[in-house]
Amino acid sequence: MDHIPEQFHSFETDEPFTNCCDCGCELIESAQMYMVQKNFKGKECIMEYALCNACKEKLDEQISGESKEKLFDFLFDHTEMVEAPEGYTAEESLKQIEECLTCGKKRGKCKGYSYSGLFVGSILIPGPMPMMICDDCQEKIADDLSEHTKDVKDKFYEENFPGPPNEMDLPQKGKPMFI
Ligand SMILES: [Zn+2]
Ligand SMILES: [Zn+2]
């Protein structure tokens, strides 16, 4: 697949993301890996961003080891993380965002959900991502995250998504995960 599937286009521009939301670096022409994440409530996209690998790693470093372990444990307990089979295509891997990674609920039946995918240029990288996680499962994971990790995430959102004050008061569960 040499184009970005529309599920990963920016809702705002209707085009693929072109720059990292944090450092602003160019994504499509660069050889750097990046992640696109979108967060939905019902049919409405409430948050979306593309984050370059360097910025994602910086964030990951700030997330406490304990939280990382819990996150890993949760995913491990609730999913069968299988290697993508030989010849697995990006088209096929797109099916992965049709149901929740951890509980298997269909996307259309979820009240809220977020999904993410990894790209290099305009190529979707097959593997454990792309993945979709429903609100209920996100809530369970969020309950396990340490206060420090929550602070790191909150700071990230405040810096990159300045919105009206009422949006800043969204409960934790309304925010997408970093995986
Ligand atoms: Zn960046
Ligand atoms: Zn779920």
Image: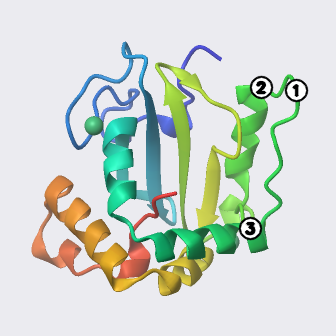
Give the Cα separation between the discs numbered 3 and 2: 24 Å
Q: Quadrant of ligand 1?
A: top left
Q: Residue at x 43, y 34 (%)?
A: 34
Label 3 CB less than 8 angstroms from ligand 2? no
Q: Residue at x 32, y 25 (%)?
A: 18
Residue placed under numbered mark 1 in the picture = 86
Look at label 3 and name its amino acid: Phe
Query: Can the viewer see residue 103 in this picture?
Result: no
Query: Which residue is situated farthest in the front direction here?
Result: 65
Q: Position of residue 90 (x, y in %)?
A: 71, 28
Q: Helix, strand, or loop for circle 2? A: loop
For residue 90, side relative to residue 30 (left or right): right
Residue placed under numbered mark 2 in the picture = 89
Give the Cα separation between the discs numbered 3 and 1: 22 Å
Could you say which quadrant of the image residue 106 lies in? bottom right
Query: Can the viewer see residue 110 in this picture?
Result: yes
Q: Position of residue 88 (x, y in %)?
A: 82, 28
